[in-house]
């Protein structure tokens, strides 16, 4: 079940994969369901098997700001980075019907301690998450809105056709009207 994900991120042996899969629970969420809530306890690691979701938070005006998108065969930000003292710092919402494999964070931590392959896999997941965050931060500071949209399209092909445009606009740091104008400009 997790083989496509591990092959994509950091290949592990069949034995390690079976150890990991023996601890997972499959969860299914309907489109627009928020399955992790900021300010609420969360003690899981998540692997996206199918669908699309996003992480977001509310700004001081109460507006939703999209932080990241996750598609099939990806891993949500590690528990370590998205919680503080077991409390989620972010919301996670399904943007299409979503199927995830979840594992208790404590069980995953123990498996990581006991198994070098799982430890290496977890390290690569953490490095990839850091890389994505830094790239987004640099892009927001140094790229035009048009260039940010082009990078978004390269990183998430076809996502524009699946997720609501206000979610994309907030991810890019622009208004929905600006996104609409850019999309029209790029069609020419």
Image: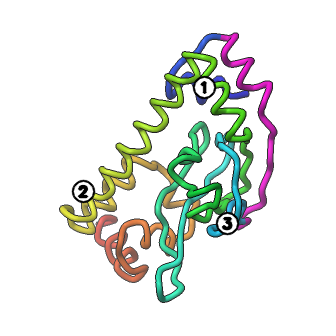
Q: Residue beneath label 3, please?
A: 37
Residue lying at 56% horizontally and 69% vertically, measured from the top left:
164
Q: Is residue 20 magenta?
A: yes
**In the image as oriented, which residue stretches furthest toward the front?**
85
Please tell me whether mark 2 or mark 3 is closer to you in this view.
Answer: 3
Q: Secondary structure at mark 2?
A: helix
Q: Residues within 10 Å of mark 3 (few under 14, many from 20)?
A: some
N-terminal label among 1 and 3 = 3
Residue 101 seen in this snapshot: no
Q: Residue beneath label 1, please?
A: 112
Give the extent of the magenta segment.
14-33
Camera-nearest residue between 125 and 184:
125
In the rendering, at what x and y percent does residue 139 appear? 26, 58
Q: Residues within 10 Å of mark 1 (few under 14, many from 20)?
A: some
Instruction: Answer above or below: position of 126 versus 62.
Output: above
In the rendering, at what x and y percent does residue 59 appear? 47, 80
Q: Which mark is residue 138?
A: 2
Do residues under tags 1 and 2 come within 8 Å of each other at their CB atoms?
no
Please tell me whether mark 1 or mark 3 is closer to you in this view.
Answer: 1
Camera-nearest residue between 61 and 144:
61
Q: CA distance from mark 1 to mark 3?
A: 26 Å
Image quadrant containing the N terminus = top right
Examine the image and state in which quarter residue 5 appears: top right
N-terminal label among 2 and 3 = 3
Image quadrant containing the C terminus = bottom left
N-terminal label among 1 and 2 = 1
In the rendering, at what x and y percent does residue 65 appear? 48, 73
Residue 20 seen in this snapshot: yes
Examine the image and state in which quarter residue 42 appears: bottom right
């Amino acid at each position: 079940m997790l083989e496509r994900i591990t092959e994509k991120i950091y290949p592990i042996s069949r034995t390690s994969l079976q150890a990991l899969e023996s601890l997972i629970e499959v969860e299914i969420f309907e489109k627009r369901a928020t399955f992790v809530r900021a300010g609420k306890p969360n003690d899981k690691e998540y692997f996206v098997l199918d669908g699309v979701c996003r992480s977001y938070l509310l700004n001081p005006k109460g507006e939703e700001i999209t932080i990241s998108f996750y598609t099939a065969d990806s891993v949500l930000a590690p528990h370590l980075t998205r919680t503080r003292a077991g409390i989620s710092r972010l919301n996670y919402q399904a943007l299409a019907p979503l199927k995830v494999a979840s594992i208790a964070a404590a069980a995953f931590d123990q498996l990581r301690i006991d198994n070098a392959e799982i430890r290496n896999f977890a390290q690569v997941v953490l490095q990839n998450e850091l890389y994505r965050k830094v790239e987004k931060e640099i892009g927001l500071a140094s790229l035009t809105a048009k260039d940010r949209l082009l990078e978004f399209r390269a990183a998430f092909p076809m996502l524009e056709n699946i997720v609501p445009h206000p979610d994309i606009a907030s991810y890019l740091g622009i208004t929905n009207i600006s996104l609409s104008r850019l999309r029209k400009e790029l069609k020419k």
